[in-house]
Structure formats: structure tokens, C-alpha cells
Image (cartoon, rainbow, N blue to C red):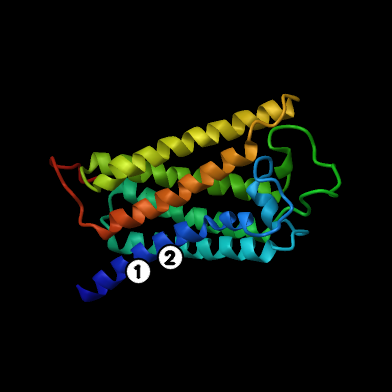
Amino acid sequence: MKERNVARWGLVAALALGGIVYSSWILEFFLDTGLDPVTSFLSELDAENQKYRDVFGNADVLSAILMLISGALGLLITPRRRLYVTGWIALAVFGIATIADASFPLECSGEGCPSSAPDGLLPQLHHVHALTSSVAVFAIFTAMIAFTVGAFRYREHRSLRTTGLTILILTSLATVWMLTTNSIEVSGGGNLGLGIAQRAQVLGMSLWLCTLAFAMSRPPSTGLPASPR
């Protein structure tokens, strides 16, 4: 019982710290990156030509490792219900994809970079980085949805049904904003805060991970009888 309790608090710590570290992009407001937060992608912060690449890249790797630990501990110590299992596996996939993200950065970002990127949706990401970023985003959204639906289905974790659901909705809206803004920019309509939209999206992901950590720190708040699967 004692070992299980230690593992549970290890899970809580890994989730919370992982969420906090994943928001390391906030440091761009204190470092001279030379990038405009309103128009730039977060992936540009750790491009190979950026002087603070190690700061942002290593933070992503640390966050990813913590997600791998969270996924493993979650599978070991939480109930083996289908939606939760899906969520823990998705978090582990998110961790793997984020490590790959940091391992295959953009070659160049900011002023002075050759404008050789092809046209189309998200032209800054026509790179291996495109695949790893897409997998990471898909994986964490899968986890967010799985845990949220699970909290409703199993009648537990009130924080996931309230705060978690709100964050999921707002993060989804930020994602739609980002994709729509990029499409308008590609068609020549100007930039409508692409960088702000992505930063809102990633901030939502970080806050949701911290919310999941809080949920795991509390005993399940059961109401009506829940489906066991």
C-alpha cells in the first residue's frame, strides 16, 4: 500500500512538472529570441540557428520524459478501464513524439533565413518536424478527450468534468483559430495572430496536464454507479 501511494504521488508530480515544463516557451518573453510571438511558431524557438535552442529543446525533452513516466505509472496504478488506458498510452505517445520533435528541429527561423519553404498549409513545417508535431498534438488531444469522456462515463474525477472539460474546449477553439489563421495567411489575407493562437493552444495543454495531476491526487469522486469499462 505504501509503495502504491508513493507511485501515485510520483505520477502526480510527473504530470504537474511535465505540464509546467511544457510551457517553457513563456521564457521567450524574457530572452532575446528575435522572434515575434504574434506571428511565429513555437517550433521556431528551437530551430538550429536559434541561440536559445538548447533551453527550449531540452525543456521539451524533459517534459516528454515526464510524460513517458506518467504514462507508465498511470497504466500500473490506475484502474484498467478502457478510456483511461487509452489516455495513458496517448500520453506516452505524446512523450515519444515530443522527443522526436526536439531531435528534428527546423533548420532556420527568424530574419535572414532563406524563403525556400513550399506553399500550403503550415509551410513552416514542411519537414520531418511536421510529422512529429502532428503526432504529438493528435496524441495529447486523444488523451484529453479520453480522460474527459472517461471522467463522465465512470462518474469520477470532478475536476476533469469541470475544469478539464473547459480547458479542452478552449484549447480546441485555439487550435481551430490557429489553423484558420494560417489558411488565411497562406491565401494572402495577412496574419491574424497565428503565434498567439498556437501559444494559447499549448498553454491549454499545459494547464490540462496540471488539471489531470490534480485529479490523480484526489480520490475518485463517484456518484451514480459507473460503467466498469
Q: Residue at x 63, y 30 (%)?
A: 181
Question: What kind of residue is marked 2?
Answer: Ile
The extreme bottom residue here reads: 2
**Proximity of marks 1 and 2: CB atoms separated by less than 8 Å:** yes
Local crowd at mark 2 within 10 Å, few (<14), some, or many (≥20)?
many
Mark 1 element type: helix
Which residue is identified by label 2?
69
Q: Which mark is residue 131?
A: none
Say above or below: 103 vs 119: below
Q: Quadrant of residue 46?
A: bottom right
Q: Residue at x 47, y 48 (%)?
A: 205
Q: Residue at x 20, y 46 (%)?
A: 228
Q: Which mark is residue 10?
A: 1
Question: What kind of residue is marked 1?
Answer: Gly
Residue 189 x %, y %: 72, 24
Residue 1 x %, y %: 19, 72
Q: Quadrant of residue 151?
A: top left
- Residue 150 in view (yes/no): no
Residue 217 x %, y %: 27, 60
Residue 220 or residue 226, whichever sits in front: 220
Q: Residue at x 73, y 29 (%)?
A: 186
Q: How many marks?
A: 2
Residue 225 x %, y %: 13, 42
Mark 2 element type: helix
Local crowd at mark 1 within 10 Å, few (<14), some, or many (≥20)?
some
- Residue 84 in view (yes/no): yes
